Image (cartoon, rainbow, N blue to C red):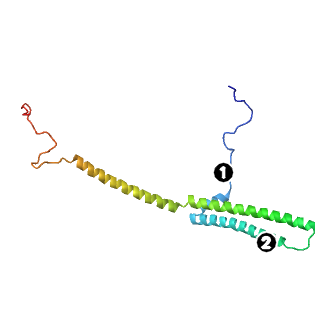
Amino acid sequence: MAEVPQTDVSRPSALPTANLLQRGTGSQSLVDQNSAEYLDAIEEEWNKKVDMEVETLVDGMVDLVSLASISNKDKFCVAQESFQAESRAESMIRAANSLLSITHSMKLLLLLSDEAQIAHRRDAELKVVQEGREDAKTKVAALLDELLRKPTSANGTDSRTEPNIPVGSSNPT
């Protein structure tokens, strides 16, 4: 078999060092916030992103409508407006893709971090399992009692055991 060729190319086995926790006071302020403030800040950030992309879409549409005016135009003006329309359309497409990405991220956040719903479902399932376990325990206890309980005959002796025969006496059977 052929050997694997040896090269002098470095093959990093780990990611290069990162500058974690060296962002300064920005990360420290997130730690100091309580949960409600943190969630409000995150919501405001998402709202700003959505507003910015919607504004880009609206501005692009206004520009496209203004460029679509029909009048006597020379070839240069038509070519210039065509280029402007294409660039506006491309920016609108980028904004629409960004909005699509934002909605996808928000759906994932909703599905994966709805802790109250997850906790409620987990508690309900735990309750059902515990009730099933208790039912199984009572059934097993009843079956064990039935098996271990020695049924007695009418004269008070155990019907499952051999009659007491003294040692040394002969058995009539």
The residue positioned 73% from the left and 63% from the top of the image is 95
Q: Is residue 33 left or right of residue 171?
A: right
Q: Amino acid at mark 2?
A: Val
Q: Secondary structure at mark 2?
A: helix
Disc sitting over residue 62 in the figure: 2
In x, y percent, where is residue 70?
A: 86, 73
Q: Position of residue 28 (x, y in %)?
A: 63, 58
Q: Quadrant of the N terminus?
A: top right
Give the amino acid at mark 1.
Leu
Which residue is drawn at the image coordinates 60% and 64% (left, top)? 39
Confirm whether residue 29 shows in the render: no
Which mark sits nearer the N-terminus, 1 or 2? Answer: 1
Can you give x and y, in whole percent of width and height, for residue 117 in the image? 51, 62
Snapshot quadrant of residue 169? top left
Q: Check disc 1 and report the residue beneath it.
A: 20
Residue 159 visible: yes
Query: Marks 2 and 1: in contact by CB < 8 Å?
Result: no
Above/below status of 113 relative to 11: below
Tally the numbered discs.
Answer: 2
